[in-house]
Amino acid sequence: MAQHSPAPTRICPDCDGFPAVAIDTGTLLEDGARATLTVTCRRCHGTGTTRTTAAPAPDVQREHA
């Protein structure tokens, strides 16, 4: 029997599927930990895919006969 598989997701070409990264600022915090900035991909907004949501279907008024 055939197995259904979900459609393959399209990986974002800008981040290659790694949408969030931590960048070391080079400074140390008071407790000795490094200060980092978390940055998300601009194109996919942190999702890692290029999948977009479909536009809602327009409301159509139909006449019943």
Image (tube, helix red, strand yellow):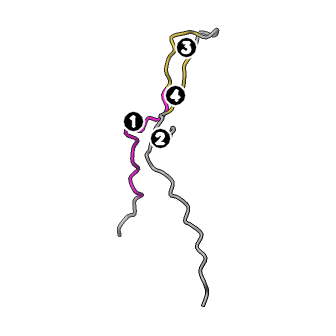
Residue found 40% across the figure and 57% down from its top: 7
Disc number at residue 34?
3
Between discs 4 and 2, the one toward the N terminus:
4
Q: Is residue 50 left or right of residue 55?
A: left
Q: Residue at x 59, y 9 (%)?
A: 32
| Marks 4 and 3, how far apart at CA | 16 Å
* The furthest residue to the right: 30
Query: Could you tell me which secondary element the residue under label 1 belongs to?
Result: loop
Circle 4 Cα neighbour tier, 10 Å, few/some/many (<14 / 14–19 / ≥20): few
Q: Position of residue 59 (x, y in %)?
A: 60, 69
Residue at 55% from the left image edge and 14% from the top image edge: 34
Q: Which mark is residue 39?
A: 4
Label 2 Cα neighbours within 10 Å, binned few <14 / some 14-19 / many ≥20: some
Q: Is residue 29 above or below residue 38?
A: above
Q: Earlier in the sequence, mark 3 or mark 2?
A: 3
Number of residues whose C-alpha sits closer than 10 Å to that of mark 1, classed few (under 14), some (14–19) or many (20 or more):
some
Q: Secondary structure at mark 3?
A: strand
Q: Position of residue 40 (x, y in %)?
A: 51, 32
Q: Residue at x 61, y 76 (%)?
A: 61
| Label whose residue precedes the other's in the sequence (1 or 4) | 1
Name the disc covering residue 44, or none: 2
Please state the horizontal and vertical placement of residue 63, each as a whole percent of the image. 60, 84
Residue type at mark 4: give it: Val
Q: Badge 1 is on which residue?
A: 14
Disc 4 is placed on an element classified as strand
Asked if residue 47 lies left or right of residue 63, the reply is left
Q: Nearer the viewer, mark 3 or mark 2?
A: 2
**Disc 1 + disc 2, Cβ < 8 Å:** yes
| Mark 1 to mark 2 CA distance (whole Å) | 8 Å
Mark nearer the viewer, 1 or 3:
1
Along the polypeptide, which appears first: circle 1 or circle 2? 1
Dot 3, crowdedness within 10 Å: few (<14), some or many (≥20)? few
